[in-house]
Image: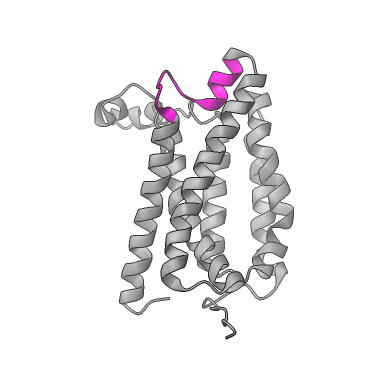
Amino acid sequence: MTVRPVKPIASVRRSSEAIPASVALIGLSLVSASGAVFPQNTWLQVGPVIAFAFLFPWLTRRWNLSYPAVLCITSFLVIHLFAAHWTYSDVPYDRWLGTIGIDAQAILGSKRNMFDRLVHLSFGLCAVLPVIEFEQNQAGVDRRLAYRLAILFVLASSASYEIFEWLIAVLMSPQAAEAYNGQQGDAFDSQKDMAMAALGAVIALAFIGINRRKGRP
């Protein structure tokens, strides 16, 4: 029996439709790298985005992704590039919020810079929909299995990234490694990062499930 792929509503029909997003990502990558706190670390985070941006128009058409899925990918990469400028753990959000009278450290109950946790949460939130559409369109996976595989993808990707961080840190100076990894003295930083990504994926799946029950695409 031939499994017919599920075509998402309002999918990208021409590669050219994703070119504006690619141009924006390349531009933001250059802005992120300009005047970065740790330039050698920033290019490790920005370089792959530039390479991906050149392939993005072709991939969106090849994978038959919907516009919401393309928006998810672009949104995460924008957040990633924003954080990469400060190497994640130095994003001065607490100082910005302090100018309007909000004590971020008191609210979060920690002096640790938590922006990296937000990025990992965003990865889980933004990765699920594109992965589900890819599984259904390219592999003919049914909806329930696609949901489970999306969770596994987020967990596996998060674990792989943490291992990559460890391997990179071995080759760096202690100062550069600490700045890149952003542990900030937390021995369980890797586990918490993966947990935040998993939480984001669960929230995304819940949102997708609610929309499906309401008859939305």
- Give percent across and percent down for residue 204: 39, 58
Left or right for 111, reference 5: left
Left or right for 185, reference 178: left
What residue is rendered at 53% in x and 61% in y? Answer: 131
Q: Tell me, yes or no, whether the highlighted magenta stretch contains residue 185.
A: yes
Q: Is residue 174 above or below residue 148?
A: above
- Give percent across and percent down for residue 41: 64, 27
Quarter of the figure with residue 102: top left
Quarter of the figure with residue 73: bottom right
What residue is rendered at 44% in x and 50% in y? Answer: 124
- Give percent across and percent down for residue 64: 62, 71
What residue is rendered at 46% in x and 24% in y? Answer: 183
Quadrant in which the C terminus is drawn: bottom left
Q: Is residue 90 above or below residue 202?
A: above
State the count of labels. 0
Quarter of the figure with residue 31: top right
Q: Is residue 115 visible?
A: no
Foreground of the two, 154 or 83: 154
What residue is rendered at 53% in x and 62% in y? Answer: 130
- Residue stretch rendered in magenta on the structure: 175-189
Foreground of the two, 193 or 146: 146
Q: Tell me, yes or no, whether the highlighted magenta stretch contains residue 83.
A: no
Left or right for 184, reference 30: left
Q: Is residue 25 above or below residue 136?
A: above
Left or right for 21, reference 157: right
Quadrant in which the N terminus is drawn: bottom right
Most distant residue in the top direction:
174
Most distant residue in the front direction:
1
Q: Is residue 140 visible?
A: yes
- Give percent across and percent down for residue 6: 53, 78
Q: What sort of colour scheme is used for the picture?
A: one colour
